[in-house]
């Protein structure tokens, strides 16, 4: 009589460890980038190489578009320093509308990479615990589901929420990928327009020997409309809470 082959008890543990690997790579990449790239991806680097970049754009526009998208996605996916420089560069190289489109596409793609990496590991564990929870935890889950879209848009529109945090938190609480994707793409448009518009006039700034002034983001004529959009995103949450439809 043949005995059953002994089961490999290390496989579940190995599988559990591997699902944390994507997020671990993102964190390691972020730490390595913070230590090595902070002085490289700068406006000074762009100033020193602008003639070469513009010449390459004129000779191989599609190649520069693909290279720009790839670099920007890597910057966002690994939370590397230089996202603001990349956004301004999009306007400098491609103009307002094409630059905004490319900036939104790249930033959204990078955000989805972080979201999927986090959801595969910590997000899966935390979501399972929330799903198995009772009482207040379950009420919190229900409240988040009812206001998922509004909360996601608010995370994108509020200027003080770091982009990495707005990518990570939704994955940890079980937000749907489709909702995360389209609210990210829509919610970052106002900020992308501002950064890209700064890049459009970057050539003149460089010619004067100056650096771009990113404090423009906090100018009343810029921050005012963005805060107005924040209020619109928060209004449905407030209304549902006042009507008693959301219990937190």
Image: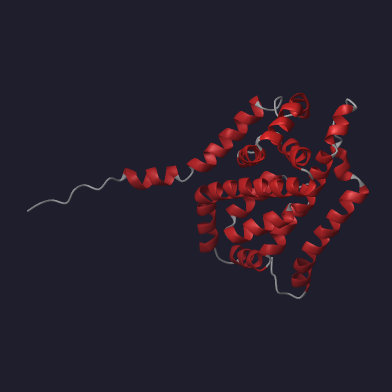
Residue 109 against residue 44 in the figure, above or below: below
For residue 227, what is the image quadrant? Answer: bottom right
Q: Residue furthest left?
A: 1
Q: Position of residue 139 (x, y in %)?
A: 62, 67
- Tell me if 1 is positioned left or right of 230 in this view: left
Residue 147 visible in the snapshot = yes
Q: Residue at x 48, y 41 (%)?
A: 21
Q: How many marks?
A: 0
User: Which residue is painted at 71% across and 38% down in the image?
Assistant: 83
* Viewer-nearest residue: 243 or 90: 90
In x, y percent, where is residue 194?
A: 82, 46
Position of the C terminus, as image quadrant, is bottom right
User: Does 197 sit left or right of 244 as displayed?
Assistant: right
Asked if residue 48 lies left or right of residue 23, the reply is right
**Residue at the extreme front:** 59
Between 122 and 117, which is closer to the camera in this rendering?
Answer: 117
Residue 137: x and y in percent read 60, 62
In this picture, is 74 found above or below 133?
above
Considering every residue shown, the one lying at the far right of the view is 220
Residue at 30% x, 46% y: name it.
9
- Percent position of residue 62, x then y: 64, 41
In this view of the protein, which residue sits in the foreground, 191 or 236? 191
Say if residue 159 shows up in the picture: no
């Amino acid at each position: 009589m043949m005995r059953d082959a002994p089961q490999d008890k290390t496989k579940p543990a190995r599988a559990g460890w591997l699902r944390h690997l994507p997020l671990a790579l993102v964190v390691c990449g972020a730490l390595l980038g913070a230590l090595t790239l902070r002085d490289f991806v700068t406006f000074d680097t762009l100033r020193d190489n602008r003639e070469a970049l513009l010449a390459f754009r004129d000779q191989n526009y599609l190649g520069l578009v693909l290279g720009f998208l790839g670099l920007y996605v890597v910057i966002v996916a690994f939370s590397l320093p230089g996202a603001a420089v990349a956004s301004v560069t999009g306007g400098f190289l491609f103009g307002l509308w094409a630059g905004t489109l490319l900036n939104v596409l790249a930033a959204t793609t990078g955000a989805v990479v972080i979201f999927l990496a986090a959801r595969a590991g910590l997000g899966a564990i935390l979501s399972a615990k929330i799903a198995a929870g009772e009482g207040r935890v379950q009420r919190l889950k229900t409240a988040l589901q009812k206001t998922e879209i509004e909360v996601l848009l608010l995370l994108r529109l509020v200027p003080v929420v770091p982009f990495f945090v707005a990518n990570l938190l939704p994955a940890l609480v079980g937000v749907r990928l489709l909702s995360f994707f389209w609210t990210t793409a829509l919610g970052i448009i106002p900020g992308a327009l501002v950064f890209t518009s700064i890049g459009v006039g970057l050539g003149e700034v460089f010619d004067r020997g100056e650096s771009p002034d990113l404090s423009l983001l906090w100018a009343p004529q810029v921050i005012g409309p963005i805060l107005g959009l924040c209020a619109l995103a928060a209004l449905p949450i407030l209304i549902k809470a006042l009507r008693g439809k959301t219990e937190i």
